[in-house]
Amino acid sequence: MADWTDAIVGDRMTVDREFNQRVAASEFTSQEWGLIMTATEFEIEHADDPERARIVADTDKLPQIMPELENIRSQVSSMGGAPGGSSGSSSGGGLLDSVKGALGLGGGGGGGKNQQLEAAERLTQEYADELQSHLEQKGKWEQVRVAYQE
């Protein structure tokens, strides 16, 4: 099943470039995204059914890298920048913190890691959807789907 990923390396590079804008708009830095992608594998669910087949992100390993993600965030914060773009250290809240909290991007309490994990899972699935869309547009999806089954 690994052969199917080898066959789409160039397509992945194209999708990576196109997806950079989406990552930049997310709560993750490019360094964090790289770590997330390293821990993510892609599979084709229902590969034997052309109508239902789809690329899915296997994020089972993401919880293992969450401590390292926190280390990256701590390093960024200690250098004066925060992933979300706010660099102030006041705990008074403010509009940006309120908006981030409403979107589930705040770092308060123990729920921060779960929110971070959920955000990483959502973003990796968005990437998988983009990759499949790209393969469909290039006329490669059927070939990749069949190769996955072999």
Image (cartoon, rainbow, N blue to C red):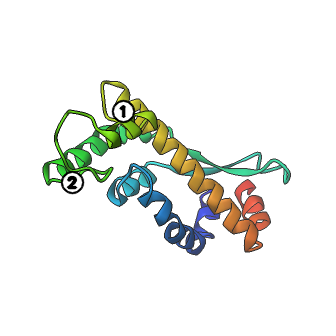
- Read off the residue under disc 2: 81
Q: Position of residue 105 (x, y in %)?
A: 40, 39
The quadrant of the rendering that contains the N terminus is: bottom right
Judge whether 143 appears above or below 114 on screen: below
In the displayed structure image, the side of residue 149 where residue 127 appears, left or right? left
Which residue is drawn at the image coordinates 45% and 40% (left, top)? 61
Which residue is drawn at the image coordinates 30% and 29% (left, top)? 108
Element under disc 2: loop
Q: Position of residue 140 (x, y in %)?
A: 74, 70
Q: Which of marks 2 and 1 precedes in the sequence?
A: 2
Picture disc at residue 35: none
**Residue 140 visible, this angle:** no
In the displayed structure image, the side of residue 117 where residue 130 appears, left or right? right
When asked about the image quadrant of residue 4, the answer is bottom right
Q: Are marks 1 and 2 in contact (CB under 8 Å)?
A: no
Which residue is drawn at the image coordinates 37% and 26% (left, top)? 111
When asked about the image quadrant of residue 58, the answer is top right
Mark 2 surroundings: few (<14), some (14-19) or many (≥20) residues within 10 A:
some
Looking at the image, which is closer to me, 7 or 103? Answer: 103
- Read off the residue under disc 1: 113
Judge whether 143 appears above or below 27 on screen: below
**Residue 77 visible, this angle:** yes
Element under disc 1: helix
Q: Residue furthest front?
A: 95
Looking at the image, which is closer to me, 140 or 18? Answer: 18
Q: Position of residue 51 (x, y in %)?
A: 85, 51
